[in-house]
Amino acid sequence: MLADAVPVVIVNVSEDRCDGVVISSGTSEPVHVPLPRFSLVKAKEDRNMLGTQLMMHNLRRRAAKPSEEEVLTRAIQRVRVGEAGHRPNPVQDILRNRWEEVVKPIINALGIPRIEYQEAGATFPRIWWCLTGPLAFLPLHAAGLYGSEVPETIHNYAISSYTPNVSSLIARVRGSRLNDNQATSGLFLNSQPSPPGASPIPGTIREVRLINDMAGKTKVRALKAEGDECLEYMEQYSSIYLACHASQDTIDPLQSRFIFHKGSLSLGAIIQRDLKNADLAFLSACETGTGEEKVSDEVVHLAAGMLAAGYCRVVATM
């Protein structure tokens, strides 16, 4: 059973053709949306370009301070951009292409109207994206026309969420309905700013402090917990916020882990626990939602693992 009136959009990407298939609760037949302007080749090109841009701007990792070499590299890049004038923005090109060739045709097929942010009482519908192939590495939630006089993005139409597969979403819906009555409320915050052998990330301290202050009288526990201790708090609290480094193991996904000051916490250890009250997991760590390019149709990242562990909602980074 899917969430009421919330469409799930499965986007197929293959050498032969690309299509969107929309399914939702209460409809007898799925909606087929052909995507003739999109292709597997374009998806691969965009994935590679996005990865290159992220590496060029040092956005694939968290670090407290850039090295001297990184500072010099960024300075050279700024000078080159200045010399070239208004050079096209590759990331904007990617977001524009995915909007025009994938997202907007699906929005039109669903009949979702544009909504302006300033409209009083405006509420946006939700779309669950289930992506395949290299498209799974592209941020459809940010697709749109940027830099134009009248910007148009998916944010004008809907709120985006991702699901690794339809089965996970069904389990999530069932779990959330059970948790409405059984879950213990509360938020566990875990900050790990300086693990050995990794670059320090003191920004995590500020993150946790701000969230702790905003939570007010809500049941909140903030500390630097290690492996087993962290698992105990995960069993006690329905929501967790992990601000730390993470390591993804694409060969053995269960060995993907969150890096702590003393040791680490593997995905396998989390899944083995009975997290019957699990609701929200916010993973403030790099690439927790990034898959493996060689097996792009197999969900091997930490965010999917947290869903498998029982969390109904997971916030992660691509």
Image (cartoon, helix red, strand yellow):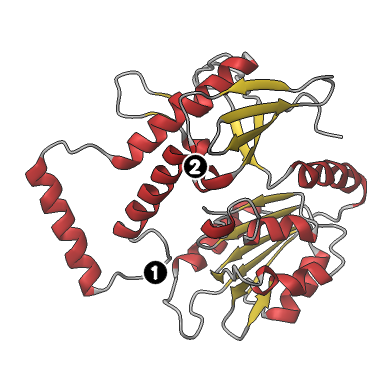
Number of marks: 2
Going from N to C along the chain, the mark reached first, 2 or 1, is 1
Q: Quadrant of residue 45?
A: top left
Residue 210 appears left or right of 37? right
Residue that badge 2 annotates: 139
Q: Relative to 195, say whether 150 is above or below.
A: above
Tell me residue 284's x, y (percent): 55, 60
Residue 153 seen in this snapshot? no
Residue 7, image x and y in percent?
Answer: 71, 27
Determine the image quadrant of residue 29.
top right
Q: CA distance from mark 2 to mark 1?
A: 23 Å
Q: Which amino acid does the dot numbered 2 rest on? A: Pro
Q: Which mark is residue 63?
A: 1
Task: Categorize mark 1 by other alpha carbons within 10 Å: few (<14), some (14-19), many (20+).
Answer: some
Q: Nearer the viewer, residue 74 or 103?
A: 103
The furthest residue to the left: 83
Nearer the observer, disc 2 or disc 1? 2
Measuring from the top left, give residue 318's x and y in whole percent.
51, 53
**Residue at image location 65% in from the left, 53% down from the top:** 215
Give above or below for 22 relative to 255: above
Nearer the observer, 88 or 259: 88
Quadrant location, the N terminus: top right
Q: Relative to residue 44, is residue 124 depicted above or below? A: above
| Residue at figure coordinates x 11%, y 38% from the top left | 85
> Residue 139 or 186: which is nearer the viewer?
139
Image check: 164 left or right of 155?
A: right
Query: How busy is the neighbourhood of tag 2: few (under 14 within 10 Å), some, or many (20 plus)?
Result: some
Return the residue found at the far front: 16
SS at circle 1: loop
Is 290 on the left or on the right of 215, as rendered? Answer: left
Please say if the residues under marks 2 and 1 sit with CB atoms less than 8 Å apart. Answer: no
